[in-house]
Image (cartoon, rainbow, N blue to C red):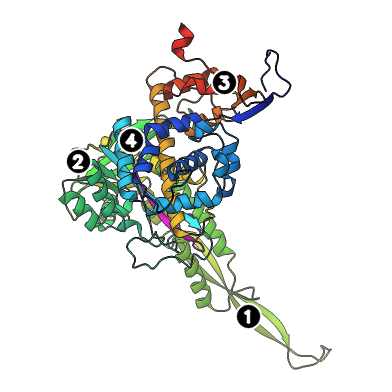
Amino acid sequence: MPSFSLPALPAAARLEVLEVGAAPVVRRFLELLDLPGLLERHLPRLPGRQADLPTAVVLCVLISNFILAREPLYGIAAWAASFVAEHLGLLPGQAAMLSDDRCGSALDHLFRADRASLFTAITLRVIRVFKLGLSQLHQDTTTVTFSGDYQDQPAAQLSNRPARITRGYNKDHRPDLKQLLYNRTITADGAVPVHCKIHDGNTSDDSVHGPTWLTLVELIGSSDFLYVADSKLCNREDMALIAGKKGRFLTVMPRTRAEDKRFRTGLQSKPVNWTVAYREANPRGREKPEVLYQGFEDAAGSQEGYRILWYLSSQKQQRDKEARTAKLNKTRKRLERLRPRGRAKAFRTKQAARDAAERVLRQAKVQDWLCVRIEEEVQIEQVQVGPGRPGPNSQYEQVQTKSYKIQVEVNTEAVRQAEQCDGLFPLMTNDKSLSLAEALQKYKYQPYAEKRHEQLKSVFGVRPVWLKNAKRVESLLWLYHLVDVIQALLEREVRRHVGQGEISSLPLYPEQRHSEAPTTELLLKMLQGHRRYQLLDEQGQVVHTLHDPLPEHAGVVLEFLRVSRSAYGLPSPTSAGQ
């Protein structure tokens, strides 16, 4: 607690300590998006007497909580009571009304709203207020994993039902658990989410691209943007839809395409005239070799007539070689130690040994690189003829016992041919204006979409989801989309000021180490724990107010974000200069 001197106080004076933290920053962005007003206008009117705490207020408090603390619903009231009420959009005393039942009812109320119209209104305001660039959009999906039965979900035939929590292809590698598919699209201008859709857990990735692209066209009002996605976009129906409506796409061509096999086979007999598309210093250390991308456009193109751009990455080339070597060594050791099932120490037939070896090769997918040879071993033993204990007159005969051992050799020619394809990856596009370097640079932004998913699951802790009502689950995930929008905008605004040369970095890491690209997590931690202290007389009137001190760089960030410095007990820049 800061030290201060005070005038003479009445004996009944008491001290009130409340958290400020980053709540004013979050509130600033909620107001910039006009989220309280948009929620109030789009939520359906409930029958009967209106609630003493509007649903829009409750939902905004939930969003603030998800960004700042991630408390369970039953802990929201206690959490909110520890903050300055106005920074959460509450009036004094309203925090106690945020019971888990009220929060759950707010999620039910949100589900009954026309969320499509509400989402469109919010997205259009984000685009207008923050002047987002929409010339390039990146789509990616992830799964949100659940545990539990969820047997009381509405019938699949209902049109207004929530997404079904069920089993599917789980990207968290938990096929034993149920899931929902979380589909999101971000801009290449700050990785700000502009589209979100929650699908049934068994929805395939390749089925979401058509509806997603059409929604983006309706949202933007034009098809003149580059739609970037992973290899699931590379199917005839979706690419024809985009190209037929004058849209542009960029995607990875999967290994299953015939064009991939054609190019890789041609490399064995005809060298490729690669050109340098991109090079940079190795981010893993100055002593490491530079990162080099070479490009080549396949003149034959795809079967549908789209461009195929091939790239050779020096980093991927090294990774492919190391991965293959590790896989070969692991499989080789496994084969050499292979034994038949049961207690037997050796294979008794040649066919049994060969079948077991081929099974391992198929599982490891290295049958082209390893050659297996089955060696026969013969052991001769002296076996007594007839029963009884051995004696001076016992007779013996020689018995041959055959066993089979697996020997492994590397197919050096096959490995050499595989090395010629190390580091290769192809992109497919219908955009004829893109050069090799431009197409690569645009696709290299795709990991930012994956990073947003990672932040959703780790930083903001969307899992575990303890709700058992599917409607409330969908509303909760919809709120988490708004969480991602706000944190992306916050990050974008600070980085924009840092990048414009006003400052080159901020000391946000431990030991005052600097960050040139501040993340939302670091910015929120910078303000975490900041408190307001108020002395109140016996009538509850404020006698004196003090705040924890703020580091200088925190004041700079508040100026960048146009957050009122008075919320932290600081004078405004204008008044400070008078």
Name which quarter of the figure residue 258 lies in.
bottom left
Question: Which of the two discs, 2 and 3, sits closer to the camera?
Answer: 3
Place of residue 232 in the rendered image (x, y in percent of width and height, measured from the top left) = 32, 54
Label pair 4/2, CB-CB below 8 angstroms: no
The answer to whether the residues at label 1 and label 3 have Cβ atoms under 8 Å apart is no
The residue at which mark 4 appears reads as: 126
Dot label at residue 550: 3
Q: What percent of the width, then of the height, locates residue 515? A: 49, 26
The answer to which of marks 1 and 3 sits earlier in the sequence is 1
Mark 3: which amino acid? Answer: Leu
Numbered mark located on residue 224 in the image: 2
Crowding near the residue tagged with mark 2, few <14, some 14–19, many ≥20 C-alpha atoms within 10 Å:
some
Q: Is residue 578 above or below residue 270?
A: above
Amino acid type of the residue that numbered disc 4 sits on in the rendered structure: Val
Seen at 57% across and 33% down, the residue is 83
- Pointer 3 or 4: first along the chain: 4
Front-lying residue, 364 or 138: 138
Question: SS of the residue at dot 1?
Answer: strand
Which type of secondary structure does the marked residue at label 3 adopt?
loop
Mark nearest the camera among 4 and 2 is 4
The image quadrant where one finds the N terminus is top right
| CA gap, disc 3 and disc 4 | 30 Å
Number of residues whose C-alpha sits closer than 10 Å to that of mark 1, classed few (under 14), some (14–19) or many (20 or more) = few
Magenta region: which residues? 172-197
The answer to whether residue 150 is left or right of residue 402 is: left
- Ranked by sequence position, the earlier of labels 4 and 2 is 4
The kind of residue on which mark 2 rests is Asp
Tag 1: amino acid: Thr
Say if residue 428 shows up in the picture. Answer: yes
- Tell me the residue at 48%/44% (across/down): 52
